[in-house]
């Protein structure tokens, strides 16, 4: 919504501004301004409040008559240069006593002693040939340019048929300075040759005037104060969240890089118990881009353990977890860019039944990995982590893995130097879901474990990105937030936590150079072969030959105690 000011066709000044120059001119010609000079310093403020959008428009008009085009400054000096420090101090005292009058006179004798006289005495002093200064309150902060009220004051002096006057432009230094050295160094003394008015004094129509304050862009337009950010609840929430984070930096850790965490794009594979807690902790760190992937629906047992779901999400067979989690994240904090995708990740040991769906899923998953900075592996099964681990290694992404037992958990980070989730295995991941009993299908873990593991996963990420080496940080490193371990293994029963590190395994079925090379060369065909036959991974990495060598070694030792096979070749 906007507002317009009515404008006369004969002038670029809106009618509301033209009223003031008329009043100035009438005060000048009638003599009112002679007894009350404040008539010459009236200004206009046009304001409009858009209360729906919390925007406030304002436009100042400082009307200045322009009928005195040939006035010239003959001489210019500062007050202290003209009168010296002692006389300047006396003038400053007079100025503070009579500042409310806007304009007054200062008579000067031969010894340059200065005395106050009211402005209305100007004609008498001029007729008697007395020396005086016309002092006025100058709002200007420019070193060489007096403020707008001087124009109107000079019009009045010219109307009084004065031809040469000395003007004191009294500025802030006369009003507020407490040190003698500062008094009078900003205030100006001007000798002005007035010339004549452009119009006769008998003409009732006022001369032209200027005075609308310009917009910072240079145009004649109102200024705008936008307070929407102070009134919008979403912006208030963003400000409060940022402040809470910045307090850590201001009060505890000045070297903490908050942007290194909040600027991350995080992909959460799994929107169950771990996914919910990780997402909430990422929000608390200021992360604003969260993508969740899951193929499950919310069941009645979920809301009490998974804090992003409610009872209503369980009704009618349950809603899809990932979109529901993203929706609830936005309800918690509307400023988050959260999206949820329903997807079944291809897994070793789970044959591909629909080739088109398989290829579409693989392309979507890889694009997601490439588009994010961090990949969290938060799934229920071991084999579901294989493909994301491989993709994270291929595209050199930060991968944070979290897994739960009954009363234990592991949180670890992957890198080219440190081991991934599969680096300690000597067998390929395979189907662990199809033949589970009913009790094995349910997550059996202590209720507080997921919150602990989820918090550790996010805090490990925060420590990692606050270290200059990021995902290449050594396991023994210490950064801004403390240690940056490779693995955190926790145990609730003894209330113990262990920090463990392990090197990347050159025969790993997920992150080794051999597996990455085959994936880069073959792409979907390789993944399909692994899904249909996980043993293909063992053949590629040489784990099958390693196992045969170990079996031969065991058989040989059992026969005659002679160890002929050398497993180190593998």
Image (spheres, rainbow, N blue to C red):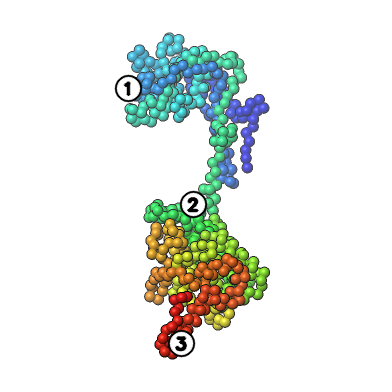
Left or right placement of residue 327 versus residue 415 in this view: right
Is residue 38 visible from the viewing direction of this image? no
User: Which sits in the foreground, 319 or 384?
Assistant: 384
Whole-number angstrom distance, CA of label 1 to CA of label 2:
53 Å
First along the sequence among labels 3 and 1: 1
Q: Residue at x 65, y 75 (%)?
A: 353
Residue denoted by label 2? 239
Residue denoted by label 1? 86
User: Which sits in the foreground, 552 or 431?
Assistant: 552
Q: Quadrant of residue 462?
A: bottom left
Tell us which disc is closer to us: 2 or 3.
Answer: 3
Tell us which disc is closer to us: 3 or 1.
Answer: 3
* Element on which disc 1 rests: helix
Check residue 555 in the rendering and tell me which mark sits there, or answer none: 3
Label 3 Cα neighbours within 10 Å, binned few <14 / some 14-19 / many ≥20: some
**Count of numbered labels shown in the rendering:** 3
Q: Position of residue 206 (x, y in %)?
A: 59, 20
Q: Position of residue 358 (x, y in %)?
A: 64, 70
Single out the residue that lies furthest toward the top.
128
Quadrant in which the N terminus appears: top right
Up-down: is 352 above or below 166? below
Q: Residue at x 49, y 52 (%)?
A: 239
């Amino acid at each position: 919504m906007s507002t317009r000011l009515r404008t006369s066709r004969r002038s670029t000044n809106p009618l509301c501004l033209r009223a003031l120059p008329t009043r100035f001119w009438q005060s000048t010609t009638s003599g009112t301004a002679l007894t009350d000079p404040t008539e010459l310093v009236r200004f206009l403020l046009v304001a409009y409040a858009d209360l729906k959008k919390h925007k406030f428009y304002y436009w100042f008009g400082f009307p200045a008559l322009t009928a005195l085009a040939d006035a010239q400054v003959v001489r210019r000096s500062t007050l202290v240069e003209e009168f010296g420090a002692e006389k300047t101090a006396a003038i400053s005292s007079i100025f503070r006593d009579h500042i409310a009058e806007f304009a007054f006179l200062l008579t000067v004798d031969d010894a340059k002693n200065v005395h106050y006289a009211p402005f209305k005495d100007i004609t008498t002093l001029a007729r008697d040939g007395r020396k005086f200064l016309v002092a006025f309150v100058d709002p200007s902060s420019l070193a060489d340019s007096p403020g707008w009220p001087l124009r109107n004051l000079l019009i009045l002096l010219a109307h009084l048929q004065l031809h040469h006057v000395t003007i004191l432009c009294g500025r802030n230094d006369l009003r507020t300075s407490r040190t003698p050295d500062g008094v009078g160094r900003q205030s100006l003394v001007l000798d002005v040759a007035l010339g004549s008015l452009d119009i006769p004094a008998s003409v009732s129509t006022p001369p032209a005037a200027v005075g609308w304050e310009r917009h910072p862009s240079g145009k004649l337009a109102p200024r705008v104060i936008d307070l929407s950010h102070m009134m919008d609840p979403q912006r208030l929430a963003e400000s409060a969240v940022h402040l809470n984070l910045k307090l850590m930096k201001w009060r505890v850790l000045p070297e903490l890089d908050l942007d290194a965490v909040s600027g991350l794009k995080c992909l959460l594979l799994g929107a169950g118990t771990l996914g919910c807690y990780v997402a909430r902790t990422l929000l608390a760190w200021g992360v604003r881009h969260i993508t969740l992937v899951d193929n499950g629906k919310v069941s009645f047992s979920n809301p009490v353990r998974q804090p992003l779901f409610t009872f209503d999400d369980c009704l009618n067979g349950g809603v899809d977890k990932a979109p529901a989690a993203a929706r609830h994240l936005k309800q918690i904090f509307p400023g988050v860019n959260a999206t949820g995708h329903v997807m079944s990740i291809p897994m070793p040991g789970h044959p591909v039944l629909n080739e088109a769906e398989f290829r579409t899923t693989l392309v979507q998953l890889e694009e997601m990995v490439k588009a994010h900075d961090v990949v969290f592996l938060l799934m229920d099964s071991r084999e579901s982590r294989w493909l994301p681990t491989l993709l994270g290694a291929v595209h050199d992404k930060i991968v944070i893995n979290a897994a739960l037992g009954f009363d234990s958990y592991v949180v670890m980070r992957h890198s080219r130097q440190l081991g991934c989730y599969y680096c300690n295995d000597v067998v390929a991941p395979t189907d662990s879901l199809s033949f589970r009993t009913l009790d094995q299908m349910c997550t059996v873990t202590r209720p507080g474990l997921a919150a602990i593991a989820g918090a550790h996963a996010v805090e490990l990420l925060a420590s990692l990105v606050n270290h200059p080496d990021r995902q290449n940080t050594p396991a023994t490193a210490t950064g801004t937030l403390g240690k940056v371990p490779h693995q955190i293994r926790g145990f609730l029963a003894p209330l113990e936590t262990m920090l463990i590190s392990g090197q990347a395994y050159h025969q790993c079925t997920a992150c080794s150079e051999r597996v990455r090379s085959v994936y880069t060369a073959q792409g979907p065909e390789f993944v399909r072969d692994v899904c249909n036959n996980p043993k293909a991974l063992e053949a590629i990495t040489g784990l099958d030959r390693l196992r045969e060598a170990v079996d031969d070694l065991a058989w040989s030792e059992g026969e005659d105690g002679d160890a002929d096979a050398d497993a180190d070749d593998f």
